Amino acid sequence: MNPLGLAPEEITRVLCRLLDEKVVATSTAFAQASVCVRPDAWVEAVRLVRDTEELQCDFFSFLSAVEWSFAESEADATKSRSEESADTEETESVYREPEEACFQVLCRLQSTTLGHGLTLKTSLEKDSPRIDSLIPVFGGADWHEREMMEMFGIEVIGHPNPAKLYLPDAFEGHPLRRDFKLASREVKPWPGDVDVEDMPEDAPVIDPSAQSTAKGGVS
Amino acid sequence: MSPTPPVLAAQARASAHLADARMAIELETPEMTLNIGPQHPSTHGVFRIVAEVDGEKLLKADPVLGYMHRGYEKLAEVRTYPQITTLVNRIDWLSGYCNEIPFILGVERLMGIEAPPRAQYIRTILSELARISTFLVFLGSYGIELGALTPFFHTMRDREKVLDLIEGVTGGRFHPNFNRVGGVKDDLPAGFIDATRQVMNTVEDICKDVETLLFGNDIFQQRTTGVGLIPLEKGLAYGMSGANIRASGCAVDVRRDEPYLVYDDLEFDVVMDDRCDSYARAWCRLQETLQSVRIVRQCLDRLPAGKIMAKVPRIIQVPPGEVYTRAENPLGELGYHIISRGGRIPYRVKVRTPSFSNVSVLPWLLKDVWMADVITILGSLYFILGDVDR
């Protein structure tokens, strides 16, 4: 571990100080810093994370997105989540999902000099998601943004070559959206799913010590 | 038929000679578009470059991806966590075992489980064996790409011995699918430690041979030195990782910067070079193979006894959370951003593969280079197409 690196709490604090009201939410759940900023501050935030003396995140790890959906099929998970979060305290170390359905763009940046890293996020509205291109800050964002455009249908403003990266030009739809169903799965349900479906909820815990000696391993 | 008068024959020869001479001075080479691939041996898969060339000079290259896009991120949305480890094995098929590590570590982190020390050591040993086998392929095939056939046979012969070790433990040569949430599937087989020590000696020998015979070869040096220069800032901005960035003078290694498994307890050097060229990238991989041998030997010495599985529920259910875990794969930094909303199936798994970022620098790198150097550069970046396309 690099001793110069900042702790997740310090990283979020630095960004809150730099961006002030442009920070929407911060999280240090699972000992990882993540900061959600307003979409209009997206490029500015990435630039600050790279150029600020305390952060120096010069390594562009990846850029991608996630669609947060609260459709009926996902309602179960959502319900239990809101019940749980009702009694937990408002701290940034507790993991929290976005409140509303949205597209969330993620960008992971690491520092090669200090060793720490953080995930920058921004939430885009569901109907016409648009985001500014990061290419002026990190040239490597080019392909990542092209992938995000075709997979999620998120428009990247200012991208010099918004052509499809993986998919054929004539392909319709955005495969990583939640409403894009796998065709094979529609025809035939996954056989593996049947196996798990019938298992009891409170299945017994396997004790590995009972069986590990039978293998004849070396120690 | 009457013979050609000698005067006319001499005139014809002279004009032909003149034409040749003019050609040598100002050969007109119209720009043309040339298709490299998708089936080219140096691309380790199906990779296509649409190149604009002027004579022997490549002006502009536009990589065309997607021939191997299998949509793992979508497939992961409809599979349970143990099923996904089978999938991720196939991302970078030369080092299948390494692909499982960050995913399993991510799931364990979300569930708050830690594998017992013996399992961690077994994981480390297998990761390093997979790294050695991957680099042996590189050391051999890079020679082939530059016209040296012999090293390939020797490295492939010894790589087979490494694969035998992996197969002996896991049952699979390329796709072990050996990790379980909370540990590994089986203990090491009897005789594994001695066999591994022997193979490590073999690997050390072949590395020394390759160093003298291939890296010491004058032609190899001339073809790689100063070819495909990647300055550090460019490499970092494009997210390049692994030996590619270490050869540009940046000593980053996830194994040391953010230690996982048991790398914290082990001694090894982060190999670095600041020459930024193809030679440096190949040289870094050669040295890293030797470092892996060193790591494996330490693990064998210190291998603790004990359980290989932690206590885990029979059905893997992951509480809501979001985590990014990364590991130093042979090709670079592999990471998974796992988002769980509870239950047996992840909500989203973003796979950050090293080759995708490493290759994304190509449009910038392949400008005004000689055609013969294109293969040198492609080979030195060492990417696997399954890892680029996912």
Image: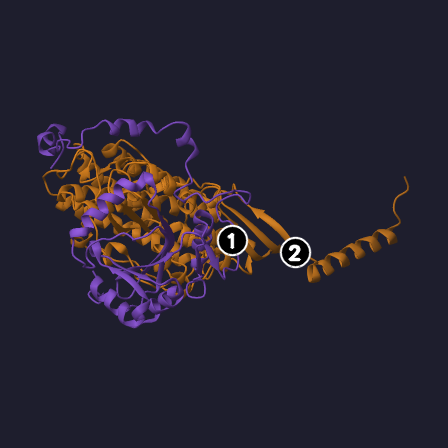
Chain colours: A purple, B orange
Q: Name the residue at 18% across, 35% down.
A: B188
Q: Is residue B110 visible?
A: yes
Per the image, the residue denoted by label 2 is: B31
Q: Name the residue at 30% across, 46% down.
A: B131
Is B324 situated above or below A71? below
Position of A9 with respect to B227 (left or right) is left
Q: Name the residue at 53% across, 52% down.
A: A163
The spot of residue B14 in percent (x, y) is 80, 57
Position of A117 with respect to B116 (left or right) is right
Is B19 situated above or below A193? below
Q: Callout 2: helix, strand or loop?
A: loop
Return the residue nearer the eye: A22 or B366: A22
Per the image, the residue denoted by label 1 is: B374
Q: Callout 1: helix, strand or loop?
A: helix
* Mark 1 closeness class: few <14, some 14–19, many ≥20 residues within 10 Å: many
Type of amino acid at the residue the image marks with label 1: Val
Return the residue nearer the eye: B293 or A111: A111
* Chain letter for the residue marked with disc 1 in the picture: B
As drawn, the label of residue B147 is none
Do dots 2 and 1 share one subunit? yes
Q: Give the total of numbered labels.
A: 2
Which mark lies nearer to you, 2 or 1? 2
